[in-house]
Image: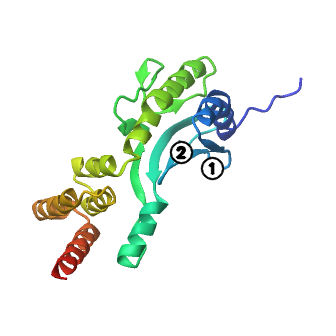
Amino acid sequence: MENTRQPTPRELITTSITETLLEPLTQSGFIFSKSSLTFKKNSGDFTQTITFQLNRYNETGISAEFRTIWSITSKAYSKWYKAKYGTKPLNDHLFTEPDWNIENWEFPFINNKQEYYSQIIEETQRPEVLTMLKNNILTIGIPTLNHFSDWENAANNFLSKNSDHHKASDFFQLADNSEKSLQALQKGLDYWKQHPNASNPEDLEEIHKRLNNISKASSY
């Protein structure tokens, strides 16, 4: 009897993504890259990306596990930053989160156990897992990307997490809100003083860079 080769985890995941998500995401304006397992969409100043991250320990016939990473970047921000400061920014990310950190994201029960990833190795469980994934992406993931593809919303998200205060300040400037831009820097200084060990020294340097720039501008 001829042996039938089992698909590798990547092949199985790629096929499942293509059959379940390609049509609805294409209709939403995303372009699929099979080589990188990403969906990308340009939306004004922003690029939205959905990345399928495979578990490195997947094994043919045993495990085909993955999760999604959601991100928003902006070349417009890099261009603005270069014009203002003469160098490239540390990065051009407005938003980067794994699916398990996105509010209201749901995960399936696999073998009566709540999991925090998508496992599709079992053929009987695969439809349920993929249906839940599709619903999450269309009703939770994409609206989240759309919400944070906005300078002020992205800035407020950073501030709510006490993270990247300098970038929050930049994003408020891009939204023409100079008052909130300055408040973001002050909040960053306050947080850094209170939590020096939890802060990145580069953040403090970036905050001072912006404060110095504001001081120079006001002296003219």
Name the image quarter holding the N terminus.
Answer: top right
Q: Quadrant of residue 209?
A: bottom left
Q: Earlier in the sequence, mark 1 or mark 2?
A: 1
Q: Position of residue 67 (x, y in %)?
A: 50, 38
Amino acid beneath label 2: Thr
Which residue was labeled with disc 2?
A: 51
Residue 36 numbered mark, or none: 1
70 or 213, nearer to the observer:
213
Residues at circles 1 and 2 in contact by the CB criterion of under 8 Å: yes
Q: How was the colour assigned to the protein in this rendering? A: rainbow
Residue 63 seen in the current view? no
Amino acid beneath label 1: Ser
The relative height of residue 215 versus residue 51 in the rendered view (above or below) is below
Q: Position of residue 169 (x, y in %)?
A: 26, 61
67 or 60, nearer to the observer:
67
174 or 28, nearer to the observer:
174
Picture residue at 24% right of the left edge, 49% below the top: 161
Name the image quarter holding the C terminus.
Answer: bottom left
